Image (cartoon, rainbow, N blue to C red):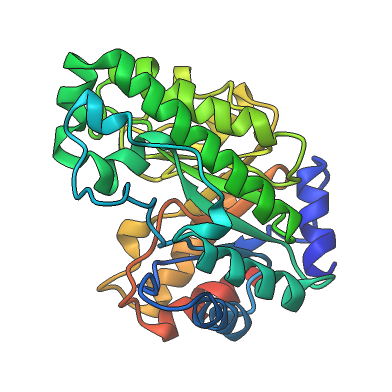
């Protein structure tokens, strides 16, 4: 099977010749042009010959002009809908267009986004976000709704440029976000994004970030693929989720066993993941980003083990 047929088989619930394999990390290219980000990303993909490409997106959600923090209801009201191509995201869209042309007919690629809650957390509201949830819930709901609309607008453009799906990262675990806050604020906003694009991508992914994920609250996302750190203590296994959910699971690689270990151990890590994932409805991948300083010889060993 070629790369596309291998993914198609998995997404249709059929048995592929082997599990498709991909890995990713943050390249730190958020200061660079979209052209350079595309070149780095394609070089990574071609060097290791992965089965598909997860395109990282390190261009942050734009801050309202003249502000360097959002800490009040009035600040949140400054968030407006905008054209992604006239924002900081224009560079990511340039990268997506170039990657789409390079991989057309050769391999699928998915584009990464962070859910509305994380967009606010990572820079816009930051340390004020929890307090805003407690003291200004109505204003926060409105802000999340605006951010979700902008993410939807961006996603539609990315998918039109050739992305096979959107990989939406969400904070879904007890060590990262209180469950009540997740259910009240984060999940509805993320659900709005995913529902809007559910028929536009063949490989939309809900990434369930963290340890001790709220799995009973996470099986209704309208996506083809669920991704999480299945090897992390306190998280459900690939087998458990496959028994409860009809879609494809992505994982198998223990990211706590890729640094300061030998390439031989990295090979075994991959073999263990393949055994855990099974023959169908399984994509072999890291449960979350691997470290950028991981030795290339170790990554090569993992690719070889995946293809063996």
Looking at the rendering, which quadrant does residue 247 occupy? top right
- Residue drawn at x 38%, y 70% is 30
Q: x%, y% of residue 38?
A: 56, 77
Residue 22 visible in the picture: no
Q: Nearer the viewer, residue 172 or 61?
A: 61
Determine whether, in the image, residue 38 is placed left or right of residue 143.
right
Looking at the rendering, which quadrant does residue 127 occupy? top left
Residue 167 visible in the picture: yes
> Compared with residue 183, is residue 281 higher up or lower down, i.e. above or below?
below
Q: x%, y% of residue 23?
A: 51, 65
Q: Nearer the viewer, residue 228 or 280?
A: 228
Quarter placement of the N terminus: bottom right
Determine whether, in the image, residue 246 is placed left or right of residue 238.
right
- Residue drawn at x 70%, y 42% is 281
Determine whether, in the image, residue 194 is placed left or right of residue 264.
right
- Residue drawn at x 51%, y 72% is 302
Determine whether, in the image, residue 204 is placed left or right of residue 265.
right
- Residue drawn at x 85%, y 60% is 5
């Amino acid at each position: 099977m070629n790369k596309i047929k291998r993914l198609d088989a998995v997404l249709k619930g059929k048995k592929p010749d082997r599990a498709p394999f991909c890995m990713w990390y943050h390249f730190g290219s958020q200061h660079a042009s979209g052209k350079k980000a595309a070149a780095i990303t394609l070089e990574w993909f071609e060097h290791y010959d992965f089965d598909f490409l997860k395109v990282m997106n390190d261009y942050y959600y734009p801050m309202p002009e003249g502000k360097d923090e959002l800490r009040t209801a009035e600040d949140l009201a400054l968030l407006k809908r905008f054209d992604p191509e006239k924002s900081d995201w224009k560079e990511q869209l340039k990268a997506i267009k170039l990657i789409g042309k390079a991989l057309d007919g050769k391999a699928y690629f998915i584009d990464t986004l962070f859910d509305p809650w994380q967009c606010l957390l990572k820079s816009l509201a930051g340390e004020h976000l929890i307090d805003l949830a407690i003291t200004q819930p109505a204003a926060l709901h409105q802000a999340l709704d605006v951010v979700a609309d902008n993410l939807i607008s961006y996603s539609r453009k990315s998918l039109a440029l050739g992305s096979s799906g959107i990989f939406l990262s969400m904070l879904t675990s007890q060590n990262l976000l209180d469950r009540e806050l997740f259910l009240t604020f984060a999940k509805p906003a993320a659900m709005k994004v995913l529902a809007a694009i559910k028929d536009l991508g063949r490989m939309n992914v809900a990434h369930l970030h963290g340890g001790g994920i709220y799995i009973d609250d996470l099986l209704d996302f309208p996506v083809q693929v669920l991704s999480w750190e299945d090897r992390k203590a306190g998280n459900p296994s690939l087998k458990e989720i496959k028994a409860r959910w009809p879609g494809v699971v992505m994982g198998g690689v223990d990211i706590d066993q890729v640094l300061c270990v030998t390439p031989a151990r990295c090979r075994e890590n991959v073999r263990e993941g393949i055994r855990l994932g099974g023959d169908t409805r399984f994509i072999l991948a890291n449960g979350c980003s691997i470290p950028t300083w991981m030795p290339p010889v170790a990554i090569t060993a993992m690719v070889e083990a995946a293809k063996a």
